[in-house]
Amino acid sequence: MCIRDRYQRRVHGDTIIKQNIGQKMSTTGKGGKARGKTASTKQVSRSSKAGLAFPVGRISRFLKQGKYGERVGAGAPVYLAAVLEYLTAEVLELAGNAAKDNKKTRIIPRHIQLAVRNDEELNRLMANCTIADGGVLPNINPVSVSYTHLRAHETPEHLVCRLLLEKKKNNT
């Protein structure tokens, strides 16, 4: 083998084939420029091309295997991955705030439940979803509270808290 002018000569049987260094050898055997990708190019995922953290290729595979339609366009999995990533980031941000409000550093299902149910749009989106170990929102129906114990400028919620504290004091 001899290298001259960025070309490499390869002896293939009786013929000598010139090949530009850094390109794939033509498989047709007719000479000319190689149509393949250069050897130095790295594979770049569709997620990194779109700037996403969610896997576009996996979502594309799931869309095809799920038989949601006969064909799946190239933009559909990218769009779906972007939407899923946005929703996940939104829920995690709100759940992180709920965890911080409860003086915790780890997000648990209860924090996700509080985050989703306190946000109007997420609550509408996940109205039919049950979050395991999420519990319920703290809520006291004002009708169930007797107003005879209410002090001036006291809401029913304050009354319930005051009565619970008094009961706790009496038990100790």
Image (tube, rainbow, N blue to C red):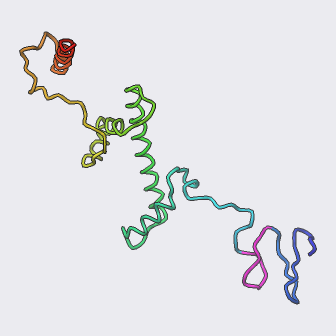
Front position in the image: 122 or 166: 166
Q: Quadrant of the C terminus?
A: top left
Q: Is 12 located above or below residue 62 in the figure? A: below
In the image, residue 109 lies in the stretch drawn in magenta: no
Q: Position of residue 89 (x, y in %)?
A: 44, 42
User: Can you give x and y, in whole percent of width and height, for residue 98 in the image?
Assistant: 37, 31
Please determine whether, in this image, residue 112 is positioned above or below residue 128: above
Judge by depth and name the residue closer to the eye, 88 or 78: 88
Q: Residue furthest top?
A: 152
Find residue 153 and report its image quarter: top left
Q: Is residue 168 above or below residue 24?
A: above
Please report the residue visible at 27 percent of the width from the left and 48 percent of the height from the top: 129
Which quarter of the picture shows residue 12? bottom right
Q: Residue at x 11, y 14 (%)?
A: 150
Magenta range is 22-34
Q: Position of residue 131 (x, y in %)?
A: 30, 44
| Dominant secondary structure of the residues highlighted in magenta in the image | loop
> How far across and down, in percent of the image, does residue 24 sit?
75, 73
Q: Work out whether residue 55 or residue 18 is closer to the camera in this orientation and state it.
A: 55
Residue at (52, 50) in percent of width and height? 53
Q: Is residue 71 left or right of residue 170?
A: right
Picture quadrant where residue 91 is located: top left
Please state if 149 lies on the left or on the right of 5 as rendered: left
Question: Looking at the image, is 169 positioned above or below residue 15?
Answer: above
Asked if residue 15 lies left or right of residue 68, the reply is right
Q: Residue furthest bottom?
A: 14
